[in-house]
Amino acid sequence: MNMATLSLIMLVAAIAIGFFLNVNVGLVSIFFAVILGYGSGQFTGKEIISGWSGSLFMTLAGITLVFAIVQSNNSLELLIRKIINKLGKAVVLVPVVYFVFAWAVSAAGPGLIPTAALVTVLAVPLAHETGFHPLMLSMTAVAAANAGRFTMLTVEGNLITDLLVAQGYTENVMMGVCVSSTILAVILSVVYYIWYKGYKVRQGMGKATEVSKFTKEQIVSLIGMLVMVILILVFKFEASLAAFSVGGTLIILRVGDQKAAFKAMPWGTMILVCGVGVLMNLVVELGGIDLLSSGLASIMTEQTAAGFSGLTAGILSLFSSTLGVVLPTLIPTVGSLIAKVGAAVTPMELCAAIGFASSTSGISPASTAGALTMGAMTSDPEFAEKYKPEKLFMELLIWALVSVGIVVLLAFIGFFRWFSVL
């Protein structure tokens, strides 16, 4: 067995062990990288460690720190409650407003996972207040967050860009990825709305509730998030440095609880993402990615490349993390696939198909967003009685498969290619 094949087997094994034994895939990946690196005799310790992306870790830590501070004083929760309260009797607009809110929060830097943790929980009281199905609200918000995660402010956007640059693609593709994903998120949300008969929620069914005023700390927190976005988008600051600057300022101003913020940061996710990168670095060096891309290319044409890439990503994401596993595994194949299948295929359409198809399957109960949705609904006494966990599990799994199917079908007919000009 050659080293390229062995490296791929170890990558698959790391993912499988992480899923079935509920162990952080990043830790398993680092362990396997040590075995593969030293065992092959082709890598030094420094070369193995070089796979850990310091810049990616800084970006993850900085952005999630800011979000954790804002989250610790309930600024965003109060903001959406105020917005919904302002709608008053115009309850029919709630799904639209919730979609925009989830997209904007995700796009501002946190990406999917922190945003999903917020919007899936808020969907429960919003469902009680408005009469909409809680699963519809939750899946709509998650779809929006999945699209919003592909801006240059987010970890996902920076990760895709870095992986493309490593393959020689310096042109920014994230505008096309984000716009196409957002349109698909709208399509999926309309499907959810129709299925759960959101149109039957009548004008005036919403009940306005008294909402407290913003505190000084909450106002400063929201301004801090806005400043971070401006620094990154307008002044072209490095995302990690802008985030740490804003986060440090908020802590100095005593806006949030420092201990609570650090505790709320997703350290496990950071280790997962960067740890997989350590193993992926060796897989690339040993030819594993070339082997994988050759296998995929053998069943693809220029017309079907995006569809098959999306299908592969969607299936893989049913059992693993988009950010930690799917993107680091499949985005590095983009260059090789284009070389083998044909130059008519663009990096943007492959990245969009991989990114959004894998994100969409995240509403599976075995993935983060689906699990958060189940947890929020079953923790509510009324909804726990109305929506049994076993039925809810199957419902989410079916929706994950249907949603991925819609995305993949559109990828096969060339949907993502339309946005390559952006």
Image (cartoon, grey):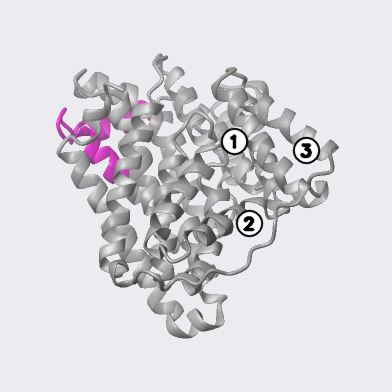
Classify 10 Å Cα crowding around label 2: few (below 14), some (14-19), many (20 and above): some
Question: Mark 3 or mark 2, which is nearer to you?
Answer: 2
Q: Which residue is mark 2?
A: 78
Residue 246 on image: x %, y %? 72, 32
Is disc 2 placed on a helix, strand or loop?
Answer: helix
> What amino acid is at disc 2?
Leu
Say if the magenta span includes residue 56.
Answer: no
Question: Mark 2 or mark 1, which is nearer to you?
Answer: 2
Compare marks 3 and 2 and give the one earlier in the sequence.
2
Residue 238 on image: x %, y %? 62, 21
Give the total of numbered labels.
3
Q: CA distance from mark 3 to mark 1?
A: 27 Å
Q: Which residue is mark 3?
A: 250
Residue at point 50%, 56% (across, down): 368
**Res. 165 image quadrant:** top left
- Left or right: residue 274 compared with residue 130: right
Say if the magenta span includes residue 302.
Answer: yes
In the rendered structure, which segment of residues is drawn in magenta? 289-313
**Foreground of the two, 368 or 133:** 133
Q: Main secondary structure of the magenta part?
A: helix
**Foreground of the two, 393 or 102:** 102
Residue at point 44%, 69% (across, down): 134
Residue at point 62%, 23% (across, down): 231
Residue 79 on image: x %, y %? 60, 52
